[in-house]
Amino acid sequence: TKILLPSFVFFFFNDPATTEIYPLSLHDALPICDVTQQSLREAIGIVPQDTVLFNDTIYYNIQYAKPAASRDEVMRAAKMAHIHEFIETLPQGYETVVGERGLKLSGGEKQRVAIARVALKNPKILIFDEATSSLDSHSEQAILESLREVAEQHTTVVIAHRLSTIVDADSILVMEKGRIVEQGSHAQLLSQQGLYAHLWALQQEERQAQVTEQASVSP
């Protein structure tokens, strides 16, 4: 079901006229079918699990989110995503070509480019779809800091299996077999001792095991 959620978003993102969805908790809510495709696209920014990069410069790949953006705007977005300093260390800086699908960048660097895109676009609604799932724990924490900064003052939807990425959420929906089985904040869900609390405990055990393993192999 998790996989279907972003797919559903993309569905009405591409063709809102076929849906009858009403945004929740909005005093001026209206049917999605009354929203133009252009306004809907402008209102949503997505950081996917697998960032799509073009075989072009880092500058182009960030500016892609807002083609009319100035160089200062692109650099400001890169700074928000905490990738500006890395780019500046490269021999060609922002003119560095990233290769097919960004093969010259690490997983964390590609995610930062995706975050910079969203920061540049500055939409009203952000969707993070497993944005840190392919990263190690150290990279994950660094990316989370960037996501938190970009998400400030925005409506944000986070789709995740790693519960550490959603502990700050105002409301968490726990899904099992296509149904919402629990809802609440991180603290509320832990106190319920239900599915969420069980998954949290398992993931914390796994994280601790990884830390112990890494410590044992360190010189």
Image (cartoon, rainbow, N blue to C red):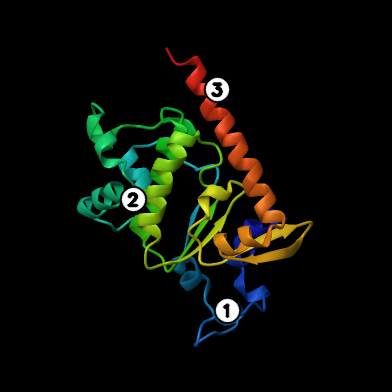
Earlier along the polypeptide chain: callout 1 or callout 3? 1
Residues 49 and 71: in front is 49
Please rate how many residues cluster around mark 2, counting C-alpha atoms within 10 Å: few if below 14, some from 14 to 19, many from 20. many
Where is residue 104? Give x, y as percent. 41, 27
Name the outermost residue toward the bottom.
27
Quarter-of-image position of residue 158 = bottom right
Q: Secondary structure at mark 2?
A: helix
Q: Amino acid at mark 2?
A: Gln
The residue indicated by pointer 1 is 24
Name the outermost residue toward the left.
72
Residues 75 and 145: in front is 145
Q: Is residue 129 visible?
A: yes
The quarter in which the N terminus is drawn is bottom right
Q: Amino acid at mark 3?
A: Glu
**Residue at position x 53%, y 78% in the image:** 35
Q: Is residue 118 visible?
A: no
Q: Amino acid at mark 1?
A: Leu
The quarter in which the C terminus is drawn is top left
**Residue at position x 40%, y 60% in the image:** 151
Earlier along the polypeptide chain: callout 2 or callout 3? 2
Please rate how many residues cluster around mark 1, counting C-alpha atoms within 10 Å: few if below 14, some from 14 to 19, many from 20. few
Name the mark nearer the viewer: 1 or 3: 3
Q: Is residue 204 above or below residue 32?
A: above
**Residue at position x 60%, y 82% in the image:** 31
Earlier along the polypeptide chain: callout 1 or callout 2? 1
Spatial CA distance of label 1 from label 3 is 45 Å
Q: Along the horizontal axis of the image, is 202 left or right of 39?
A: right
Spatial CA distance of label 2 from label 3 is 41 Å
Kindly identify which numbered label has been placed on residue 213. Answer: 3
The residue indicated by pointer 2 is 63
